[in-house]
């Protein structure tokens, strides 16, 4: 017969009587809930005899899968839950290895790595500037110190004409060189053709 329990957040859960005396996690708020013990007759019938053990194991696997789907975590008898990150820890643990919570002092210690259970900081932190932001600020500061006083000639009309004339001259030299090369090749081919014709006569 299912056991009905209520969480402090108002969520009501119906759990199997096989979980009597164990702890589960509330799917709504994540609080650890203790399942009250049932009467001995129910506990005895839930255990069953040795012949029903294989069927009972399969039922437990299906039950565990169902609890995983709704977010309930079954804790063993030797386990407790960290109040800070809600991960499983041994009952006699002094520190939570996941988030650094000290069970004796009630404070979290600084850990080297980022906790998987607490990926985002809970308090507002000042974000550091990216490298791009730093480069933009540097450029703005430099422009304030030494503003650009004149166009350095890249956009003036006279320099545009000079660059155009230079490009035309370069194109003319390349064109003349190409034509001379092809004339030379054609001249050699014509000479060889005349020599062959003379030898064949």
Image: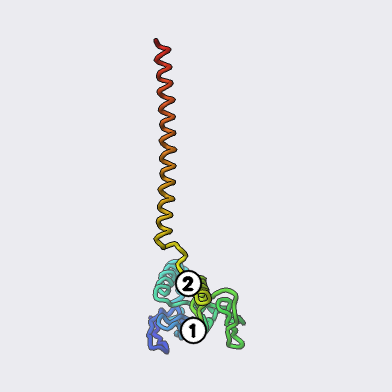
Q: Which residue is rendered at x = 49% and y = 74% of the image? A: 147
Q: Which residue is mark 2?
A: 149
- The local crowd at label 2, few if under 14, some if 14 to 19, many if 20 or more residues have their Cα within 10 Å, is few
Label at residue 33: none
Residue under the point 41% across and 32% down = 182
Spatial CA distance of label 1 from label 2 is: 44 Å
Residue receiving disc 1: 124
Where is residue 38 shown, x and y percent of the image?
45, 84
Query: Residue 188 versus residue 12: which sits nearer the camera?
Result: 188
Q: Pick whichever of labels 1 and 2 is earlier in the sequence.
A: 1
User: Residue 106 sits in which quadrant?
Assistant: bottom right
Figure quadrant of the C terminus: top left
The one nearer the camera, 118 or 66, is: 118
Out of 182 and 2, give the one closest to the viewer.
182
Q: Give the colour scheme shown.
A: rainbow
Q: How many marks?
A: 2
Please, what secondary structure does the residue beneath circle 1 have? loop
Quarter location, residue 191: top left
Marks 1 and 2: which is nearer the front? Answer: 2
For the question of whether residue 149 can be seen, the reply is yes
Q: Position of residue 137 (x, y in %)?
A: 50, 75
Residue lying farthest front? 158
Could you tell whether 145 is left or right of 172 in the image?
A: right
Quadrant, the N terminus: bottom left
Q: Position of residue 116 (x, y in %)?
A: 51, 74
Q: Is residue 51 visible?
A: no
In the rendered structure, are the residues bearing label 1 and label 2 in contact, judged by CB atoms less than 8 Å apart? no
Residue plotted at (58% across, 80% down): 100
Instruction: Give the image location of residue 171, x and y in percent.
Output: 41, 45
Where 175 sits versus 94, above or below? above
Mark 2 element type: loop
Question: How many other residues sit within 10 Å of disc 1, few (<14), some (14-19) or many (≥20)?
Answer: few
């Amino acid at each position: 017969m299912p056991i009905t329990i209520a969480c402090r957040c108002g969520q009501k859960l119906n759990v199997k009587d096989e979980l009597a005396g164990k702890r589960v996690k509330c799917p709504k708020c994540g609080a650890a809930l203790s399942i009250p013990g049932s009467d001995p007759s129910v506990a005895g019938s839930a255990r069953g005899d040795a012949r029903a053990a294989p069927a009972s194991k399969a039922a437990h696997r299906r039950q565990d899968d169902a609890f995983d789907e709704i977010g309930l975590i079954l804790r063993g008898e030797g386990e407790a839950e960290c109040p800070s990150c809600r991960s499983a820890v041994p009952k006699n643990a002094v520190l939570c290895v996941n988030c650094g919570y000290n069970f004796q002092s009630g404070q979290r210690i600084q850990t080297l790595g980022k906790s998987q259970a607490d990926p985002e900081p809970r308090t507002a932190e000042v974000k550091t500037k990216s490298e791009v932001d730093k480069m933009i600020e540097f450029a703005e500061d430099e422009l304030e110190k030494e503003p650009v006083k004149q166009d350095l000639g890249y956009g003036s009309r006279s320099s545009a004409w000079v660059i155009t004339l230079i490009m035309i001259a370069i194109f003319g030299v390349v064109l003349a060189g190409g034509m001379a090369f092809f004339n030379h090749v054609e001249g050699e081919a014509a000479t060889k053709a005349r020599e062959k014709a003379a030898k064949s006569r």
